[in-house]
Every structure is written in C-alpha cells, then in structure tokens.
Amino acid sequence: MWIRNLLRSMLLGVPIGVTFLDTIGYVARVEGISMQPALNPESTNTDYVFLSRWAVKDYRIQRGDIISLVSPKDPNQKIIKRVVALEGDIVSTLGYKNQYVRVPEGHIWVEGDHTGHTLDSNTFGPVSLGLVNARAICIVWPPERWQALEAKIPNHRKPVSTQK
Amino acid sequence: MGFTSILGKTLGFAGCALQYACFTHCTFEYVGDFVMCSGPSMEPTLETNNILFTEHITPRMQRLRRGDIIIAKCPTNPKQNICKRITGLPGDKVKGHFMRSQYVPRGHVWLEGDNSSNSSDSRIYGAVPQGLIRSRVVCRVWPLDKISTLTQV
C-alpha cells in the first residue's frame, strides 16, 4: 500500500519539481578559472551560484550580466560568461580573426573575466541569444562568499560603440 | 458551508490546476508537442498551416541524422522558430555563401529548407549551433487528408 502511495506522490511531485527548475531557476556549481576573480577566486574551492531562468525568459539581457549558456561547440556543455556587448555594438576583440566586430542581430558577445584563460567569444565569435540558459544572480555557497553578482564590465572591455 | 470549506476547495482546485500545468509543461518540454508551421521555405514537403507532431527526445540525446526535419530557434531572433532539414553534420563539406564550400564546425549543423530558391537558412546565416535545436518532426497531423510520417527509415 505504502509503495503505491509513494509512486503516486512521485508521479505528481516530479513534474512540479522539474517545472520549478525549468522556469524559476536552480543552483549550479561553477567549474574552472575562466570567471576569476568574480567566481572561484581561489582555484581550490568552488562556488555555487543561483541561476535564474525567470530573468532570461524574454531574452532581456544587459551588458555586464553573468549568464550561463549552452556552449556553441558542444551542446552537452554549459558555460558561464559575462555579457560584454549586445546586438549592434562594436567590440574590440582580443585575438579573434577580426580586430573589430559588430555583433550581429540576435547575438551577444560574451567573455570570461579571466582574460587569457577563458574560452569565449574571442575564440568562437558572437553567440546566438537562443543559447542563453539562465542569469547568475548570487553566490549561495560557501556561506562566507555569499553575495549578489553585479552587472559590471571592466572599463577597458567596454564596447567601442553601443546602440540603444 | 463555512469560510474554511470554501477556502479548502479553492486551494484544492488551485493545487490540481498547478499539477496539470506542470505535467503539461514537462510533456511539451521533454517528450513531444504540436507545432504549426508557416512560410514557404519547406515546400513541397510542408505547406503553410500544416500542424506537425514533434518529439524532443532525439535532439536531447544528440541522435540527429542528415535528412531529419527539425524545429530550431532562429539564430537571429530567439523568439522565432524555424523549421528546416538537416543537410550537414559536423565535419561535412557544404556549399555556403556564393557556393563557396566550407566545413560544418564542431557542435553545429547545416540547415536548409526544401524550397531552396525561397528559404533563408544556413546559406545565409551559416551553420547553426546544436544547442538551438528544439525538436525533430515526426509526422503531420493536419490537414487530415495529408497525414503522413516525415521521418526517414
């Protein structure tokens, strides 16, 4: 009898949980050093961040936001980067095939904070907005690192010209 | 009939509605859904206002093949969906801009409409990341006299 009840509550509970994770957000572990110093400032311990799906549901993204997106090179992998430029902006690139790039319609330019140790738009070019998965809102773990993540771009990485 | 029983009934109804909404979300997101297509790019295979049944399992498992018809987010406008046929997988040689041949990069696919003279596809915006693919078309369910499967054997 109890096993039937358990199955019944799982059948009802799992879809609710999945829907919550899909629409509101979830907590994920940050791997790698590409976002130093904002995330994982020491390579030894890893940060856990809250990723809000709700914040990107209509693709409203600002320059400086930290977002997670599906890697354009490997659809099974998610990467976390900072938005540097939006569509129509002109960015000065670091080691891309062209020195200056105008971000095409429906695309964004993303970069890791740790210049030189990150695989970002300087390698694979502008990414389509449709690949954006969620926006990182705050660091939730470890407790001494608890803080909201602000939208900011270092001055030397601001786009050369911006639209809107 | 007191206030509490009305409240209880309302909450019960809301809970039920929530369960159904979540169940629907999961089905449409992970199993399959119905899509109405519009535009001339896939003629003669598909025409405007055909309703298609699509499944989400194959794209999630990365089991896509050349020749599959897929629904993907438009690379230039994520709020719009496109319906095209996969004509090239990573590593394939394809004809791009001005018939210049190029290779499909890793993690991307080459999409083309069946109506090659009236379709904006990979020949215009290049290879499309696999992360944009949402589902694979299985069959046409409307209009009723044209019900047919659209998968390859």
Image (cartoon, rainbow, N blue to C red):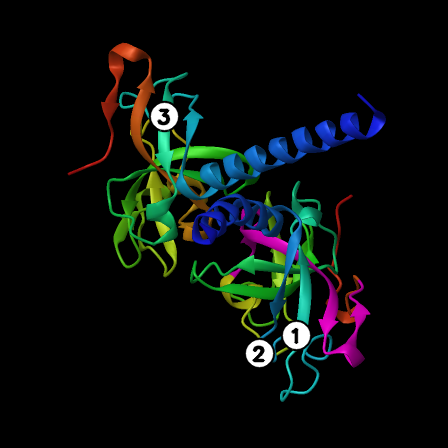
Name the residue beneath numbered marker 1: A35
Badge 3 crowding class, 10 Å Cα cut-off, few under 14, some 14 to 19, many 20 or more, is many
Q: Is residue B131 magenta?
A: no
Disc 2 + disc 3, Cβ < 8 Å:
no
Mark 1–mark 2 CB contact (< 8 Å) = yes
Instruction: Name the amino acid, label 2.
Output: Gly
Percent x, y of residue B147: 26, 18
Structural distance between the alpha carbons of marks 1 and 2: 8 Å
Distance from disc 1 to disc 3, alpha carbons, whole Å, reads 42 Å
**Percent coordinates x, y for residue B42 in the rendering:** 33, 26
Point out residue B93 in the picture as x, y percentages from the top left corner.
Answer: 25, 53
Residue found farthest to the left: B153
Residue to which mark 3 is pinned: B52
Query: What numbered label is drawn on residue A137?
Result: none
Tell me which segment is drawn in magenta.
A125-150
- Mark 2–mark 3 distance (CA, rounded to whole Å): 42 Å
Q: Chain of mark 2?
A: A
Q: Residue A57 at what x, y percent from top left?
A: 65, 43
Q: Nearer the viewer, residue A156 or B1?
A: B1
Of the numbered discs in the image, which one, if any, rests on residue A32? 2
